[in-house]
Amino acid sequence: MEIVILAVVIAVVVVGAIGGLVVGSRKKKQLPAAKAPSATPTPTAPPAEPHVGDEAETPRDEARRTIEEVDLPGADAPASAPVATEEPAAPPAPEIETPEPTAGRLVRLRTRLSRSQNALGKGLLTLLSREHLDEDTWEEIEDTLLTADVGVAPTQELVERLRERVRVLGTRTPEDLRALLREELLTLLGTDLDRAVKTESGLETPAIVMVVGVNGTGKTTTTGKLARVLVADGRSVVLGAADTFRAAAADQLQTWGERVGARTVRGPEGGDPASIAFDAVKEGIAEGADVVLIDTAGRLHTKTGLMDELGKVKRVVEKHAPLDEVLLVLDATTGQNGLVQARVFAEVVDITGIVLTKLDGTAKGGIVVAVQRELGVPVKLIGLGEGADDLAPFEPEAFVDALIGD
Ligand SMILES: Nc1nc2c(ncn2[C@@H]2O[C@H](COP(=O)(O)OP(=O)(O)OP(=O)(O)O)[C@@H](O)[C@H]2O)c(=O)[nH]1
């Protein structure tokens, strides 16, 4: 009996040992399938133990969709549809225009001038053609000139000379009278003044033109139109948007520039005009541009404020190169007010040329004479409309012919 019990115990021990061996070898076989612990384990993230469903995980080397293939939120293409890989549309490049040539612009635009200046030219001719040129008629001639803003002193000079010549020559035919009037008006305007906008610096650096004037006179528009005049004449231009007073002025100037392929340097709204002007000239030098045009703000609230601002722009710009031209923009429709503005600006900065805008909208073309007298500098350009090429070099002969017909 004892032998039987001993045999049963041995058998149980043997069976238990074999079972233990089998279980142990199974466990060892499972180890390679377990997730390998991270190479750089962190104290807060112990290696994950393998668990049920691990095999269903997407293998790491499975092909993945690229960013281009992933539908963006809002895209309504069905998932199964082929994914379009279209490039986003680039903004259209601004079309570069070819401005009209400057030669003969005034002749082309003369109808605008004659329309608005009829009262002056035709009025004078009608009066001069009267049978008797008596005292009253000469007074009417004087009034016509004064109404057209020619100014008192130039009016008196003109009437005196005309009276004398008519008396001495005894001439009264319409052709002769027109010729006399033409000569005298040309004498008033001056035919030997240098009216070219100075855009050759004569140095390695670009010519620098500063445009000044009261806001609203057409200063920014004129700067843009002048860029076109220069481009039409084969010059390369950089624009400086130093009028930081009116928020939209820089945008407006930039649009003008883009139309003719000229870069515009601008700064933050309300920024320092002098630093923008400085940067514009720097850019002009870097680009090897022929001309840098600087649009400034013209606030007339105090003369000292204006003086400080324009003076600073000038000083800062001249760290690079001297200013070649300071153009004063005046609105011809403001008449005597324009003369007051001219006086203030002339005290603040050395004006070298005048631009008279909106001559298409006033019968007061005599302001050309008056403002030249006032400042002692020539009218170089005139604005004859809102169109891009409606800025013309001022030519006294074409101007007078438009006034009195030829
Ligand atoms: N009819 C006519 N309108 C003009 C002429 N020149 C400019 N203008 C118009 O005058 C208005 C004022 O012109 P701007 O260039 O904005 O005036 P601005 O002096 O620059 O004004 P700020 O930008 O505020 O300094 C615009 O509507 C222009 O189109 C011109 O010769 N004839």
Image (spheres, rainbow, N blue to C red):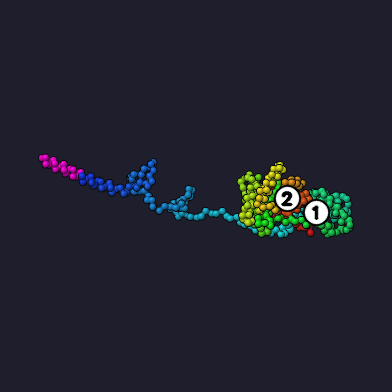
Q: Given this view, does label 1 or label 2 mark the residue nearer the observer?
A: 2
Mark 2 neighbour density, 10 Å: few (under 14) some (14–19) many (20 or more): many
Bounds of the magenta segment: 1-16
Does the magenta segment cover residue 7?
A: yes
Residue 99 in sight here: no
Q: In the rendered image of this protein, does residue 306 appear above or below residue 128? A: above
| Kind of residue at badge 2 | Ile
Mark 1 neighbour density, 10 Å: few (under 14) some (14–19) many (20 or more): many
Q: Residue 143, percent across and down? A: 82, 49
Does the magenta segment cover residue 198?
A: no
Q: In the rendered image of this protein, does residue 18 appear above or below residue 289? A: above
Q: Residue 364, percent across and down? A: 77, 50
Q: Which quarter of the image is occupied by the C terminus?
A: bottom right
| Residue at (32% x, 49% y) in the render | 33
Residue 374 in sight here: yes
Badge number at residue 188: 1
Q: Is 112 in front, or is 63?
A: 63
Q: Residue 325, percent across and down? A: 70, 52
Q: Is disc 2 placed on a helix, strand or loop?
A: loop
Mark 2 = which residue? 351
Relative horizontal placement of residue 15, taking residue 226 as reference (left or right): left
| Kind of residue at badge 1 | Leu
**Which mark is first along the chain, 2 or 1?**
1
Q: CB atoms at circles 1 and 2 under 8 Å apart?
A: no
